Structure formats: C-alpha cells, structure tokens
Image: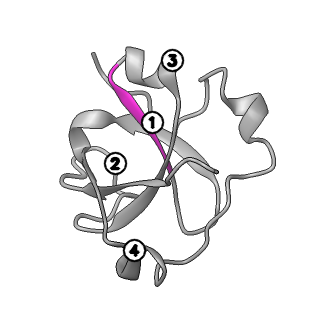
Amino acid sequence: MSKKQEFAICLANEGFDDLEVWKVYRVLPDSKAAGVGCIRVIDESGEDYLYPADRFAVVDLPNIVRSRLPEWQPSRDHKALRAGTRSRRRPTV
C-alpha cells in the first residue's frame, strides 16, 4: 500500500511572490529539508521547490477532497533535487 499523500496550505507568502496564500500544495517528503526548517511542495507546473515550513500548515484532507485535487506529479528531476539545493529563493535563517 502506498503512503498517503500529504498536503499543505500556504499561510503567508512574504518574500515568495510565487506562493499563493490559501492555496493547497502537494508536499513531498524530504527529511533534509525538514531538518533545516523547510518544506518541499509541488507547484501547478509539477515542479517541486523548497520553502520555509513556517509559510505552510500541513493538513489532513478528507478523501472526497483529495480525489478532486489535480494529480500533480513530482518533476522528473526530483530524485536529483532531493539533495536539497533547489529553491526559488533561499530561506533566511
């Protein structure tokens, strides 16, 4: 059985104009990103990016909602990107 997909809602986009507040994003597990306070989300293009985790709230959506969300897939380069160097803007620490 596959692991249940995680989702997060963007709560703030200060400094990250490409994020949409209140938009639901699919989350990719990334322990290295989490270790430095970041979250990896997939945007509408299907590409994944790192952002500060405090910009999001991870949510548990009901199955009826999950079934209606677009089926964005991780980018083909996702495994290469897991090393954690790609983000649209480097978070300030």
Answer few, some or many: residues within 10 Å of disc 1's Cα (few below 14, many 20 plus, some between 14 and 19). Answer: few
Please state if 37 lies on the left or on the right of 69 as rendered: left
Res. 59 image quadrant = bottom left
Q: Nearer the viewer, mark 3 or mark 1?
A: 3
Q: Nearer the viewer, mark 1 or mark 4?
A: 4
Identified at 73% across, 52% down, the residue is: 75
Residue 16's disc number: 2
Q: Earlier in the sequence, mark 4 or mark 2?
A: 2
**Residue 78 on the magenta span:** no
SS of the residue at dot 4? Answer: helix
Magenta residues (range): 37-41
The C terminus, quarter of image: top left
Residue identifier under label 1: 89
Amino acid bearing label 3? Lys
Query: What's the CA distance linking mark 4 and mark 3?
Result: 29 Å
CB atoms of marks 2 and 1 within 8 Å: yes
Answer few, some or many: residues within 10 Å of disc 3's Cα (few below 14, many 20 plus, some between 14 and 19). Answer: few
Query: What's the CA distance linking mark 4 and mark 2?
Result: 30 Å
In the rendered image of this protein, does residue 55 appear above or below residue 71? Answer: above
Query: What's the CA distance linking mark 2 and mark 1?
Result: 7 Å
Residue identifier under label 4: 63
Amino acid bearing label 4? Asn
Please state if 49 lies on the left or on the right of 89 as rendered: right
Identified at 21% across, 36% down, the residue is: 54
